[in-house]
Amino acid sequence: MSFPSQRMRRLRRTETLRRMSAETRLSRDNLILPLFVVEGGGVREPVPSMPGVLRFSVDQVVDEAKRVSDLGVPAVILFGIPEDKDPVGTGADAANGIVQRAVSAIKRSVPDLCVMTDVCLCEYTDHGHCGIIEGEEVLNDPSVERLASTALSHARAGADIVAPSDMMDGRVAAIRTALDANGFEEIAIVAYAAKFASAFYGPFRDAAESTPQFGDRRSYQMDPPNRREALREMRLDLEEGADVLMVKPAMPYLDILADARREFDVPLAAYQVSGEYAMIHAAAQNGWIDGERAMEEALISIKRAGADWILTYAAADMAARLKS
Ligand code: PBG
């Protein structure tokens, strides 16, 4: 037989053949847009380290929700930035807190848009940690209590899904119990299950004003070298009642995502975090890469590794580019 009999290039020859041969496809249905909500009225304030990302007041976030829903984005996840912070994060579970008001306003005017909420204390505590502190220690169980109360307040405001991102032990079970005890059996939990202590959260902390005032998050978020431990974290969250497991960040942790895809039958989410987004935009602004193509390639890699849902600040841009 003359060499080579197998020619891999045959199916790459034309755009049509490539379209027919694509193993993975990015769909608008996969995308979830994070939105930052601030106090005030008429606010649409750019986040300097995240080109194209704005912080919205409640009135404006409703318009944005409508716009992205019209583009075909099925879901948003809300982050609140309150005016006042204190040691226990009182604003996090306030019935009239910033996220609670944003959820009800969005559900009122765009009822079909799935509204998720990020459940955490770091935006609401004056020390910037994701839980209650004693001295410089972040306490687990008292934090879990506050987180469960926060998730419940989001459900009461009308959230479709709550997503705890704090990485305290036992919080998924506590949230499930609190929701069920109050008639919210149908509200799903997306657990930030394998969330790593990452340098890629930098721009987010500017946007959310949630930088820890002392120390770092390494006593609760995962250590980047650990792959087996990530599976344990995910298994525990599943046992505690998580409906969807999330890996975060996405691109530096695609191996974790691929492991999870093999190991679990539940839907998987991945979060393309602020630093991943910012790097692509920064390089594109310098003319060093084609930003749109790089973003699409980054998102397809996350899908290919096994994610069903992708949280990305590029959700609206990408939905506008995708045909379905
Ligand atoms: C809150 C939270 C963070 C992110 C999502 N939820 C910040 C952190 O853990 O410091 C990061 C998202 C991003 O970087 O885009 N705990």
Image (cartoon, rainbow, N blue to C red):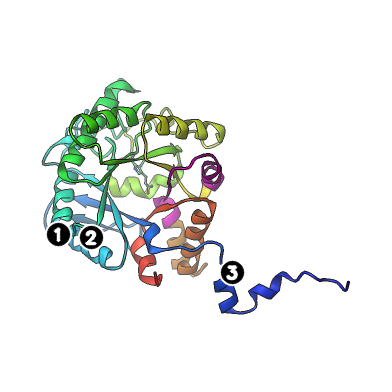
The answer to whether residue 236 of the structure is visible from this angle is yes
Q: Main secondary structure of the magenta part?
A: helix
In the image, residue 262 lies at what x, y percent?
Answer: 55, 43
Q: Quadrant of the N terminus?
A: bottom right
Kindly identify which residue carries mark 3. 21
Q: CA distance from mark 2 to mark 3?
A: 35 Å
Nearest the eye: 123 or 158:
158
Please name the residue shown 56% across and 67% down the image: 22
- Picture disc at residue 109: 1
Q: Quadrant of residue 128?
A: top left
In the image, residue 249 lies at what x, y percent?
Answer: 45, 46
Q: Quadrant of the C terminus?
A: bottom left
- Picture disc at residue 302: none
Q: Amino acid at mark 2?
A: Ala
Start-end of magenta stretch: 253-277
Does the residue at mark 1 contact the one at mark 2 (Cβ under 8 Å)?
yes
Q: Amino acid at mark 3?
A: Ser
Nearest the eye: 260 or 291:
260
Some atom of ligand 1 lies within 8 Å of the CB belonging to the residue at label 3: no
Q: Quadrant of residue 312?
A: bottom left
**Of helix, strand and loop, which one carries label 3?**
helix
Point out the frontmost of discs 3 and 1: 3
- Picture disc at residue 65: 2
Looking at the image, is mark 1 or mark 2 earlier in the sequence? 2
Nearest the eye: 281 or 294:
294
